[in-house]
Structure formats: structure tokens, C-alpha cells
Image (tube, helix red, strand yellow):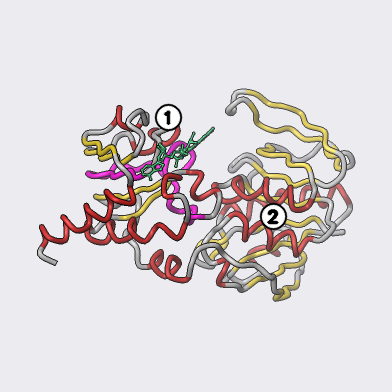
């Protein structure tokens, strides 16, 4: 059975991460005497881009539920396509690194993350991976089915042109993001460049409660962001995740609603000029980093704040 590889896209174009993943998959396939099948979501780039690096088949999925990254939808879609394959390869990007464990669970496979070199052997799979926050190299031996993530920039891109073919296939997945949320995403202020950001965390309890966060952002002309768990569990798109492992931002105003203020979150937002924290727990660590703090229930404070701002603006 083929070696499967996920080819990441951004706005339909193959990312460098996709080319790296296909290059790596080709090296694995050569060792296994196998071929490479790439999976691409909503790609508009021609498949030739992937044939050039060794993919003999490209499975193209056109599905609006996969237009914005959500870990569970991506994992489910790939699990449906690869069936009983022994090896699935991704690049360890923000997206790939996030949904790879879910994919491994769905396939009942091992996860071997952040590999840095072609495997010494493929059966069992023996490979080097970065460990201890990049300070060490570990040699891993994995038997059976494997989901493998490749550390970005470690293997590189290697041309190995083959003649390939593409097939359009369908998957049965639904995104937890509502259509409204998805539409709002495309019209949004760019998070990295935003002067004002309204961010929310697990204190919001559920994705359907984000209306007031969107509304507060709207009246302030702000972008929206979220803590890592909210994007991990598919409440919010991964593009909104800020912090050590997400985007690092430094707006003039950062409003954090229902976010505890873990050190990993602060690592990405702590340099914001003015930080406002709304949290029901007076002991929440975020208050130590706040310029202004409101101890209260977000479900009361945020609507009241929206009303005040609207009244101030006369709208
Ligand atoms: C290696 C590593 C990297 C990480 N990278 C990141 C990262 O990049 N970004 C990130 O955000 N996290 C990251 N984390 C996770 C981080 O440690 C925290 O677990 C996470 O930030 C917590 O998210 P949260 O504050 O939304 O949820 P919680 O910790 O569950 O906090 C929820 C908060 O909401 C408050 N709350 C509850 N109900 C209400 C209400 N009704 N009104 C107001 N407040 C309410 C609670 O008092 C609490 O303070 C990382 C962790 C690790 C180990």
C-alpha cells in the first residue's frame, strides 16, 4: 500500500511544508519499494507541483468544511482516505502538529513526531527525531502503523520527478465552525497587524458563545484571537491561536476574556501595550500582567461593555 502524505495548502497554493512532506514521503517510499500518494484539501495549484517531488498520485478533496483548519475535521478526512495504510506523513506545522495525534488515534497508529532525517529502516520504522525542545536527538523504533510528522526545514525539498495522476475524491466531514464563523473569518482584520485584539478562552464554555466576542471586536474595530485549547478542540480556527505555539502579537490593546493567563499564552501576547483582563476568578494569573482587570462573569461583563462602547460611539 502507498505511503500517504498530507500536502498542506494556503489559499489553494501548496505550501513549502507540502513540498517538504512529499520529498520526505518519496525517501520513505524508495526505502519501502512503494509509491507516494498525496492528499490535498481545496488545492487550486496543479498537481504537477507535487509530481515534481515524487508523488505519483494526488487525491484532491474539495470540501468547504476543510476550507479553514479545524483539527478534528482534518483528522477525520485523512483517516477516511488512507484506510489501512501503514504510513501517513505530515509536516510538523502549526496545523500538522496539531491534528497528527488525532489522526494517529483515528487510525490506531503510533505517532512519531518531529523526525529530522530519512528513516534508517522502514520495517520496523527507525528514525531520528528532535527531542527535549530541540536540544536532543532521539532514535525511535516504531512497529506497525505510523503517523509521522517531519520537523519543518529539517529534511528539505528534493526534486524527484515522476509522472503522476490526480483523482478528485470526497470525504464525509463537518467543521465545528459555523457558516457564519467561516464567513466572518474571510472578512476579518489581520490578527498579526491588528492594533486592537479581543481574545477569548475556555471561560467561554462553548463555541456558540463567541457571538459577543465577535461583537465586541466589531465595535472596537479589533481582530479576534483565542487561547490554544479553544483552537485545539475546534471551537475556533487555528489561525486565531496566540501564544508560545501560536501567533505572537503585540497590539495596542489586548482584551482577554475567560483566559487564565498561562505562561505559554503570555509568551505570545505579553508585549501588548495595554492589556485588559476579564475573568471571574480574582486569582487568575492573567491579572498580574493586566493594566486593567475586571473580576466578573464574562457573560455579564462583555454585553455591558459592548453597550457602553456603542453608547460612547453613538451607534
Ligand atoms: C508546550 C505548551 C505550549 C502551549 N502553547 C500555548 C499557546 O501558544 N497559547 C495558549 O493560549 N496556550 C498554550 N498552552 C496551554 C496553556 O498552558 C494553557 O493550558 C491555556 O492557555 C489555557 O487556556 P485558557 O486560559 O483558555 O483555559 P483555562 O486555563 O481553562 O482558563 C479558563 C479561564 O476562564 C475563566 N472563566 C471561566 N468562566 C468564566 C466566566 N464565566 N467569565 C470569565 N472568566 C471565566 C477561568 O477563571 C479561567 O481563568 C501551551 C501549553 C504547553 C504545555
Residue carrying label 2: 22
Give the extent of the magenta segment: 235-257
Q: Nearer the viewer, residue 293 or 148?
A: 293
Where is residue 280 shown, x and y percent of the image?
34, 39
38, above or below 296, in the image: below
Q: Is mark 1 within 8 Å of ligand 1?
A: yes
Give the foreground label among 1 and 2. 1
Q: Is residue 72 left or right of residue 253?
A: right
Q: Nearer the viewer, residue 233 or 144?
A: 233
Residue carrying label 1: 263
Quarter of the render that holds ligand 1: top left
Where is residue 75 shown, x and y percent of the image?
67, 56
For the N terminus, the quadrant is bottom right
- Element at badge 1? helix
- In magenta stretch: residue 256: yes
At horizontal 71% and vertical 48% (from top left) the residue drawn is 24
For the C terminus, the quadrant is bottom left
121, above or below 62, in the image: above
At horizontal 24% and vertical 50% (from top left) the residue drawn is 195
Dot 2, how many residues are within 10 Å of its Cα: few (below 14), some (14-19), or many (20+)?
A: many
At horizontal 71% and vertical 67% (from top left) the residue drawn is 58
Tell me which numbered mark, 1 or 2, is placed earlier along the sequence: 2
- Element at badge 2? helix
At horizontal 22% and vertical 60% (from top left) the residue drawn is 219
In the picture as drawn, the residue positioned furthest to the bottom comes out as 168
Dot 1, how many residues are within 10 Å of its Cα: few (below 14), some (14-19), or many (20+)?
A: few
Amino acid at each position: 500500500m502507498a505511503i500517504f502524505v498530507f500536502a498542506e495548502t494556503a489559499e489553494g497554493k501548496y505550501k513549502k511544508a507540502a513540498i517538504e512532506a512529499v520529498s520526505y514521503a518519496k525517501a520513505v517510499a524508495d526505502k519501502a519499494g512503494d509509491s507516494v500518494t498525496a492528499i490535498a484539501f481545496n488545492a487550486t495549484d496543479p498537481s504537477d507541483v507535487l509530481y515534481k517531488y515524487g508523488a505519483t498520485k494526488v487525491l484532491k478533496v474539495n470540501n468547504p468544511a476543510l476550507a479553514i483548519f479545524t483539527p478534528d475535521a482534518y483528522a477525520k478526512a485523512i483517516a477516511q482516505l488512507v484506510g489501512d495504510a501503514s504510513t501517513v506523513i505530515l509536516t510538523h506545522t502549526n496545523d500538522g502538529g496539531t491534528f497528527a495525534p488525532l489522526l494517529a488515534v483515528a487510525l490506531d497508529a503510533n505517532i512519531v513526531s518531529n523526525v529530522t532525517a530519512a528513516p534508517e529502516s522502514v520495517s520496523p520504522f527507525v528514525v531520528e527525531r528532535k527531542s527535549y525542545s530541540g536540544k536532543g536527538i532521539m532514535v525511535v523504533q516504531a512497529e506497525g502503523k505510523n503517523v509521522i510528522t517531519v520537523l519543518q526545514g529539517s529534511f528539505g525539498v528534493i526534486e524527484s520527478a515522476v509522472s503522476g495522476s490526480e483523482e478528485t475524491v470526497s470525504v464525509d466531514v463537518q467543521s465545528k465552525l459555523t457558516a457564519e464563523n467561516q464567513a466572518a473569518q474571510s472578512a476579518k482584520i489581520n490578527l498579526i497587524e491588528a492594533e486592537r485584539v479581543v481574545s477569548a478562552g475556555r471561560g467561554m464554555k462553548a463555541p456558540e458563545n463567541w457571538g459577543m466576542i465577535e461583537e465586541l471586536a466589531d465595535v472596537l474595530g479589533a481582530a479576534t484571537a483565542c487561547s490554544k485549547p479553544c483552537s485545539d478542540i475546534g471551537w475556533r480556527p487555528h489561525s486565531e491561536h496566540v501564544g508560545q505555539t501560536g501567533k505572537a502579537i503585540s497590539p495596542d490593546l489586548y482584551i482577554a476574556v475567560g483566559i487564565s493567563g498561562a505562561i505559554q499564552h503570555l509568551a505570545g501576547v505579553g508585549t501588548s501595550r495595554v492589556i485588559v483582563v476579564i475573568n471571574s476568578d480574582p486569582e487568575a494569573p492573567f491579572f498580574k500582567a493586566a493594566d486593567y482587570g475586571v473580576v466578573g462573569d464574562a457573560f455579564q461583563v462583555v454585553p455591558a461593555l459592548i453597550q457602553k462602547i456603542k453608547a460612547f460611539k453613538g451607534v
